[in-house]
Image: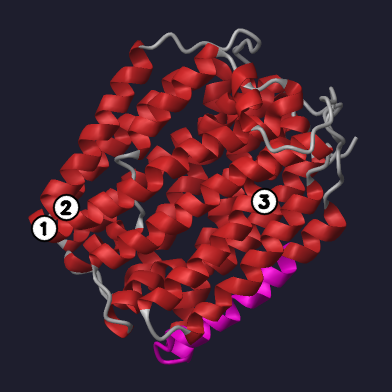
Amino acid sequence: MSALTETGSTRPGWRKGLTRNVVILGFVSLLNDGASEMIYPLLPVFLTAVLGAGPAAIGIIEGIAEATASFLKLYSGYLSDRVRRRKGWIVAGYSISNIIRPLIAFSTSWTHVLVLRFSDRVGKGLRTSPRDAVIADSTPAEFRGTAYGFHRAMDHGGAIVGPLAATALLLIYHDNLKTIFLLSFIPGLLAVSLLLFGLREKPVESPVASSAAFNFRAAWAEMSTGFRKYLWIVLVFTLGNSTDAFLLLRAQQLGVPVTLLPTIWVVLHIVKMGFSVPGGILSDRIGRKKVIVAGWIVYALVYSGFAFASSQWHAWALFMVYGIYFGLTEGVEKALVADFAPMHLRGSAFGLYHLIVGVGAFPASLLFGLVWQKFGAVAAFGMGAGLAMLASVMLSMSAVTVPQVTYKER
């Protein structure tokens, strides 16, 4: 039987987590992230060197953008449960982002970038929770860590291809950033096309009562106490998890030249990609909580390192270790959400998770930028490290359990 079959696949071991929809969504993310990452590593330089913006402006842009996306993730997740269809939301979200994103090339002030990043994140908000729910709908419970790890690995694969393409194009077009932004439309178009013709809708099971009202409070009331505790702890961590644009700015301060910023971004994503599937498999075997705590501790150590780094090689080394944090947490956190979620409210559960992350995203990035501007990098990165350690302690000591999933040695 093909590796692309749905949950009834007879393939052995961790590959049972790689159903058709998981694989299709993985390749869509690879192409979409390739398009996005042709722009993102260059955006801080574009804002500061071309448009004259400062660290606080970067924090405002990224904070508003990510907070917007997170509120829409709640809305789209809930409605995908209500209408019992998810593909339309996913297609619309990817389409909006890949039309809007290249228009950053025409920006003449940082406020223009703010508007376009806001619009781009609207697309992300529409697609993310339904997409994450589709992965849960298509994957056996005991292989969710593997499935989400694979999806994140493919996403990071795009983040490797994108900056490499940007680096090559910078050499060809003599550091013309605007041309690179425009060319990002090509892989974005391929991503939307694959999604349209490749993804197979799997109807949501266990229908709920019909309602025209948008009432996420009812969904919240159905969630378990353990899930609610988990979300509050995630919020504490997120308050110290500012935009990675600050890491790129810090790398530039430490001596990494502008032409190598896409390369250091590639190094980060190579490590992310390499650890995402093993991190997911590990969580399937020993439990999600232990793996997440380990990842958050790695994050705290990395931010402490950035606080006191003093040379270019420190930046390269810290970016590599930073990738381990992502491999241990990104897919695993989502797998834990899927473990908690009632079958008929998976979209809503992911929406609530992303909302909590978004609620913390704006103050995290804004506060980080303001602290850096007023007190310096050491204070800002130290703050991020401290909050990560606090969240690690809270999760390790909490009684967050998921009774419906049994983790087994394989």
- What's the residue at 16%, 56% (across, down)? 372
Overall secondary structure of the magenta section = helix
Q: Relative to 183, is 168 on the left or the right?
A: left
Q: Is residue 308 visible?
A: no
Q: How many marks?
A: 3
Horizontal and vertical percent position of residue 110: 37, 76
The C terminus sits in image quarter: top right
- Front residue of 409 and 250: 250
Q: Relative to 178, is 32 on the left or the right?
A: right
Density class for disc 1 (Cα within 10 Å; few <14, some 14-19, many ≥20) is: few
Density class for disc 2 (Cα within 10 Å; few <14, some 14-19, many ≥20) is: some
Q: Which residue is mark 1?
A: 374
Q: Which residue is mark 3?
A: 127
Q: Amino acid at mark 1?
A: Lys
Label 2 vs label 1: CA separation?
Answer: 5 Å
Q: Which residue is mark 2?
A: 371
- Front residue of 145 and 185: 185
Q: Amino acid at mark 3?
A: Arg
Horizontal and vertical percent position of residue 99: 65, 73
State the extent of the magenta-drawn residues as a range: 171-191
Q: Residue furthest front?
A: 213
Up/down of 346 relative to 99, above or below: above
Which quadrant holds residue 194? bottom right
Which quadrant holds residue 174? bottom left
Q: Amino acid at mark 2?
A: Val
Which tag, 3 or 1, sits closer to the chain's start?
3
Horizontal and vertical percent position of residue 44: 34, 70
- What's the residue at 48%, 76% (across, down)? 166
